[in-house]
Image: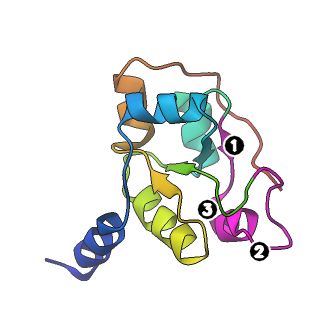
Amino acid sequence: MSAIDNLLAAARAGLDRAAPEQALRLQRDGALIVDIRPHVNRLEEGEIPDSVVVERIHLEWRLAPDSEWRLPQVNPDSTVIVVCNEGYSSSLAAADLQRLGLPGATDLEGGFRAWRSAGLPIREGGTPAVP
């Protein structure tokens, strides 16, 4: 296996990854879905309703429970589901968030494209990212 394959496997070993239908149930129960996809993908493909858009380069600062730039709805007990296009970058990002003190961080298996393939709700894309 390549180094990135090993890194991805290690990241996923610590995650309780959510299938699309499970992610929707978790969201309805209060989980925060965080979309880290590039603007062009969100604009072309749409977004998950009630998700929060955070650029990947800002993710740790916006979600680390002890960050002065943390989103107000995030605390150490939060369940956060990170979403990328296909579920690779989101696994690495969720593992980073766990290391920063957010044990409820996980990701969406198969990413946004699995959500869309499952026929789950989608809103028009292009929401500005959290500054």
Image quadrant where residue 126 sits: top right
Relative to 26, residue 119 above or below: above
Mark 1 lies on residue: 52
Image quadrant where residue 8 sits: bottom left
Q: Position of residue 45 (x, y in %)?
A: 52, 29
Label 2, residues with CA under 10 Å away: few <14, some 14-19, many ≥20: some
- Disc 1/disc 2 C-alpha distance (Å): 19 Å
Mark 3 lies on residue: 56
Q: Amino acid type of disc 1?
A: Val
For marks 3 and 2 on the same chain, the one whose residue lies earlier in the sequence:
3
Magenta segment includes 63: yes
**Tag in front: 1 or 2:** 2
In the picture as drawn, the residue positioned furthest to the left comes out as 1
**Tag in front: 3 or 2:** 2
Mark 2 lies on residue: 66
In the picture as drawn, the residue positioned furthest to the bottom comes out as 3
Q: Amino acid type of disc 3?
A: Arg
Q: Is residue 47 visible?
A: no
Which residue is found at the position 30% from the left and 74% from the top? 10
Q: Secondary structure at mark 1?
A: strand
Q: Secondary structure at mark 2?
A: loop
Q: Position of residue 66 (x, y in %)?
A: 77, 74
The quadrant of the picture occupied by the C terminus is bottom right
**Tag in front: 1 or 3:** 1
Q: Position of residue 109 (x, y in %)?
A: 35, 45
- The boundaries of the magenta stretch are 51-73
Label 3, residues with CA under 10 Å away: few <14, some 14-19, many ≥20: some
Q: Position of residue 31 (x, y in %)?
A: 60, 41
Relative to 63, residue 116 above or below: above
